[in-house]
């Protein structure tokens, strides 16, 4: 409720067109719905431009079903991440149009397709083992209606494989770079691209990778400008951020 | 040099309008200039949209002067970060229009003003001690011609101070959030804003802050979507990223 | 044995009403009972106001039974934490009134109900996956006779969900805040409440959460005053601390 | 502004006793004051029971003076922590009654004395080098009107020195335990006391203390119940928490 | 394509012996092959002297088969590391000459034997549990045609066991030292040998080994000169590095 | 071979009582025996006073059998630690007198009993879950012929349980203190005892225990003098060290 | 006060030879003396065999003087560690026989010489920069009357320098090994010696030494048995422990 | 002393051409010289091919002079690293030909020039601030007589600057890559070069660089084969290792 909305409401109270209790109710109208295990944030789509997302890990199937059902009462699309096959079933119980993206471990529901956006997103993936995280980014950004391309196995140890894709890099409005092991790829891409780069470290690696700490530090310390980083293995966060950036473009 | 440029060049060689050695020279033309201490990357402005930036820390004044002079031979603007008063003098020796932003520890040179951009950037700063980092972000983004607003002392322990600025938050195209200590501000802002949020942890704090590790981890683990993080105290990186995002918008 | 008790005993020795060896025995009377695997601290209820608690993890069922039996010889209530279903059976063998709180992983025995206390405790829980830890806090505090309310899914990324519960917050005598991921909730609550806040980081999260290190550091570095922190996932410790604080109030 | 207050205001608008714009102003009335470098939170004393505190480290003297002056416009007491002699001068410029507690590195201003509270707080300090942190706790708690006792050099390596003070321990309503090096003292005290214990790790130590990490982990992992921990060297936080706990008692 | 090659090609275009489009194709000829899950780097054998290696961990069997088949189209040898029995089957489907080195967890394919190299490599292994890592180094170096000896159980706690092998140490052109626990062996060997030493920390150990962090730090801080370190458990990296060093010798 | 032994040997060569080649063989006689997977250090019993010990974790049963057999060819006693039931079977195949200490996860073989030693060792164990580590220490020290007592559940949160055993503490020649969680016990014991204390942190705990890092740091930073620490969960190392200390006494 | 002492006292009360209040006073007689900044533990010499030691770092000169004076009222010897020249002056004000050991940063006072002990201690020091820590160990152990030898620059990168001192190693009753950088020396010494080894990591080093963390982990993970570790740079702790071990021997 | 030398000596004893005591002396002849603060390892040049190096940090000038003098009694060259101007003076007192390499913080003495070696070493340096470490590597390798080239400011954020130097990269026998911040350069170089790469992380950076930890982890986790790493800022170690590798080549 903006200040302007509020001024209008007060004017109606002054004019006795709205009763005190009705006004109170309108102001108090809670923009969330309390269910047994959660407070579903219906207002989020208005506030942030995308409905609440279900992070399935650690949630019970019955809770997932209930949350999904509650969100879909008002929203046209639903995204559930870190979803096992069991979680997929739980969402499907809430809505028959649920789709499972196995590699990305995501479930999506599109009651109607999101409006297409002109922004182009490119997901670059350093190694084959990083693909699940890259796919999570791709699926997430797609839910916003963005066009998303994906290029795999372009790690820095064979730099010509990356250089061969300069055209795609230059056409992107935002690039998501997913890399494990030493995580050097975002630094190289950041130096080549003229659009924002979202770096995603992965836990792919062993030994002194320390569960993704190594590529995380690499990305945070990048000498390239125009690079920002999300949590280890957080393909969702990167895809979401990229969509917000690319969508902006579309919005104008 | 794009494939198309290259095809054209080859055609000229075929037509013997360009000699082999000239063609070779054109292809090899190195887009950087080697000076005593550095390889100045003139091509960067073309490639990434902004000339190379001088990170002054650990560089000798004579090197700073030489690098500044070399960049300014081709570029209209110059940004030097982590600049002491001594570094400012070094840049001024390269160009008389050098300006010193003391709080931000930045030097800027504008041979001509950058073209104004319609994108609006908002810098939020949790505490008074975080201001230098916030200022570095502001100065950096300003060099791209973006409009940059700044709001200080809006930490989460008095959440109403933040809520009082909802209007500015909703009008922004990109928000930079600077916070030390526990670094919780980006999570709250991320949940309120509908534009991308760049989080900057600072080394402000003590004890278990461990030099900014605490707010860094907080920001990476944020439960809000649409937030990406840069290095501790890296106001420059955040301002640069924000400008790339906001500029995009302008570009359309 | 207080100084006064001791003075009285010495007077009885002086008056030869108590023999030297009896006096010695009384003084040496060990306020614990040695069983095969433990030294059960019967004195604890006197000293600290609550009988010893069984931390079941890593203990064998037969040991749990024996310890439970020994404690219940003198105590009216028993709490066993980190209890599997198997541990529950072990306690039930010691006493038929054992109850299992599955979500909280706790077993309680109440030979008679604890005396009700006027102090009100509120447990706030940031996300659905943090509920087991919050429940452990709730069950623990309930054993002291405190009134304990619980509110779930009030994380900072949808701050209005928290603000909607301001009334409960202001009525509490002590608030326990349970949060994983970035753990920002206690900072916001600490800035809103006028009672002590006990913060509990959880290991809920992934990547740079590092098993709960991220929310732990967040909570320790909080910019809000009136917040103290317990170990990661330590719902028991938070509930116990909250009860000690709320009980104080009741005591007056 | 509570719901009830708001209902009353709406009724006055309905009755046209308050104009729309006046009502709007009352609702918007910002409970903070914006000065050049900060948003001073006047509402804090109402909300949390104690005015905002100035953390001097990293603030410029002129800012400290301005903030102090702004707080003291409405508040009767002022506390400034991590205060150098220079910071003391800055506060004194704001108010002549400023006092400097050198050991505690605190400045206090009492326009009138805080109302005495019946709650008793005991500060225990493991080693001589921990005294500044203990003093910060003592000065802070005193600002709430609490009675605060302090006992130094009662580290666990000479446990009889602690046992000799059992009486003071049993009389306390809340105990603050300050310890560096291995930080074992709160565990022992927690096992002896029947009131809440606030543990404060200090950076006193060397080698594998890692700036206070060692005693911090010790305190978080304590096997004693009824202990919660604040940040390393955070005497202020401990004193504030203790006062909130002891004050509660007084309030009843 | 070297500058000289390129000059020659341009001359042919000038002389119209090669068409523009053919020249373009030759220049663009990508030295990698794109398959469904990877970009196989055929150029690597030319560039670095050894074909691409398959790191099997986290790859699906069908991907391993496809990558192996693609590499073996052009290469004479193939190495697959971190290979389970299932991964071995996957490689065997690509080529019947696949061999499984169970202890080393490696699969090798030799369409024809690598050319023998005069360089001698010695692999020293501190403890029995470190043998798998040592074997990975041995198998890897053998694929380059180097002579590789291996000595096990020569840890520093029985230094005479090492001193008894001084002859082998002095005959080596490069020594790989594999050690877990405290990882002291490379320091001692580095002080005895007159050839480069490659140190490999292993995750063998417990407690404060922290997954191999302890021996890793030991090796990086070695007081012996002529020692460089690879990742924890990275027998492959050490064997590869050693072969590059020993092969150099052979090349002259 | 001492200098004196060597002088004697040289004298025999001078006197031609020993041939050059025989002398060479005696000097070279390697004090270890090479078997397929190890270099068994027979000389160790002479050098350090106790035969080599088998650390079973990560060793194959057939290797354990072979190593055990080789050691027992010359030694009267054998100790195998971190031994599963399978490892016990492996040792029993080497010698029928093998005994399994399940709680301690140790196998012992005594072809004849070790000579009794007058030194008294006391093992103190903070919690019930630490017993396996304490038992490992007890079994190890017993193999040296020392008298070893053990006291369990004497953690610092009920300090009177420890104080009740002052007599045993004062009679010990060396005390091993085993503690997980916060690991405060060695500091208290170190302040009470007048003999060396060996501290053993355990991985018992959760959350900020970080696998035993917390008690490890506690013990290293102890404010008590006369305390030294071994690796996390290293009951063997503590028992061995204690026996070396207590045995010394006996030796005089 | 032992049980036996207490029985005697009770008998005297029974016989009315000691009044109740006198008995009470004797029992309560606190074995420490409270001065302005400390509780000096006079009982320590009785309990642990050596008077309290002053850790000067972070203590004010006037406090050092007062503590020193209080200790020397009852003790014959005094040790002050981490002592600057200023701290030396402070001790000298307490007693004219104060001596300053500059390299060891220790002050000692011997009112009369400690009784000589037959135990031999050997301090081994890996590098020249580790000498201050080694000297601190030497001075400390000397205060107990032990014979202490010291050997410097015997690091593992030139192992023959260590092997040349085998005789001293074999004659020692306890060896203190001081090493920075990778800290491998204790493992080698532990494998050669037949007496307990106390390992002291130092902060000598750079880079991945992380202030002594590297050698600390090395020593804790040592594969040699009979080694225990003290805190980084804790020469005092090592010397004290070694003296307790060597003294034991003497005691017999 | 080899086995063959020893056989010859024994034969002389047998033949009574060498006395027992002379033989003993020859065998014991210690290949180091004991001076006041060190055991100078004269044998090192024989054993490892280069005389001992003086690490000046933490050493007193008089000790540096004495060690330098002792080494130069037998060696033709001397290298002193981490040398301040004061340390340079100390070496010059030992020999007048001492030269100071200020940027590299090294002192060298060449009584005669080292024999030239055919091996070519290339030092690549990512940023201007990394130059001191790169210079230390260059000076060190030069002392072995190797040809050493150096290329600065070739960081990955402007990859074409590196690609412009492919020729130098392909001509090298060993490449040292020095990089701070994110440390990605060795991965890119490792994928381009066909010779061994020695990676040197530097402490250049800030925030999440954690003193060089970030580039260190990057380099250890490199996805490029043929790369090994030395300690943070250890230019000396890298130069030494490179010289050993390049020299090998020369030796053949």
Image (cartoon, coloured by chain):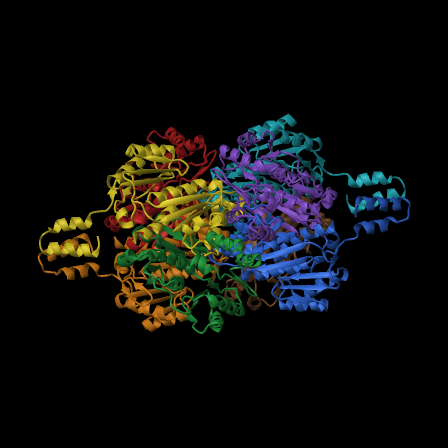
Chain colours: A cyan, B brown, C purple, D blue, E red, F yellow, G green, H orange
Place residue D148 in its image quadrant.
bottom right
Q: Nearer the viewer, residue C60 or D193?
A: D193
Which percent across, then down, holds residue D127?
53, 60
Is B118 above or below relative to H43?
Answer: above
User: Looking at the image, which residue is at 61% across and 37% down?
Assistant: C77
Callout count? 0
Q: Nearer the viewer, residue H234 or G246?
A: G246
User: Looking at the image, which residue is at 9% across and 52% down?
Assistant: F17
Q: Nearer the viewer, residue A125 or D52?
A: D52
Which percent across, then down, holds residue D213?
52, 53
Residue A225 visible in the current orientation: no
Name the side, left or right, on which B251 lies relative to H195. Answer: right
Name the side, left or right, on which C96 lies relative to G125. Answer: right
User: Looking at the image, which residue is at 84% across and 39% down?
Assistant: A21
Q: Nearer the viewer, residue G16 or D88?
A: G16
Which percent across, then down, holds residue B46?
56, 52
Residue D226 visible in the current orientation: yes
Which percent across, then down, holds residue A15?
90, 42
């Amino acid at each position: 409720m903006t200040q302007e909305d509020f001024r209008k409401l007060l004017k109606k109270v002054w004019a006795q067109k709205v009763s005190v209790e009705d006004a109170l109710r309108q102001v108090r109208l809670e923009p969330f719905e309390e269910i047994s295990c959660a407070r579903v944030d219906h207002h989020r789509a208005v506030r942030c431009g995308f409905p609440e997302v279900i992070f399935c890990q650690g949630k019970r199937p019955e809770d997932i079903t209930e949350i999904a059902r509650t969100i879909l009462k008002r929203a046209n699309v639903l995204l559930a991440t870190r979803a096992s096959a069991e979680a997929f079933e739980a969402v499907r119980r809430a809505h028959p149009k649920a789709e499972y993206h196995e590699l990305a471990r995501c479930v999506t529901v599109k009651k109607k397709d999101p409006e297409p956006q002109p922004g182009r997103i490119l997901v670059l993936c350093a190694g084959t083992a990083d693909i699940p995280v890259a796919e999570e980014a791709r699926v997430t950004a797609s839910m916003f209606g963005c066009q998303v391309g994906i290029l795999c196995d372009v790690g820095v140890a064979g730099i010509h494989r990356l250089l061969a894709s300069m055209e795609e890099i230059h056409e992107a409005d935002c690039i998501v770079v997913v890399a494990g092991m030493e995580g050097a790829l975002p630094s190289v891409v950041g130096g080549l691209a003229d659009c924002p780069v979202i770096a995603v470290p992965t836990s792919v690696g062993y030994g002194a990778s320390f569960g993704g700490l190594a590529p995380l530090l690499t990305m945070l310390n990048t000498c390239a400008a125009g690079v920002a980083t999300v949590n280890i293995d957080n393909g969702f966060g990167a895809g979401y951020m990229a969509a917000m950036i690319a969508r902006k473009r579309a919005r104008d």
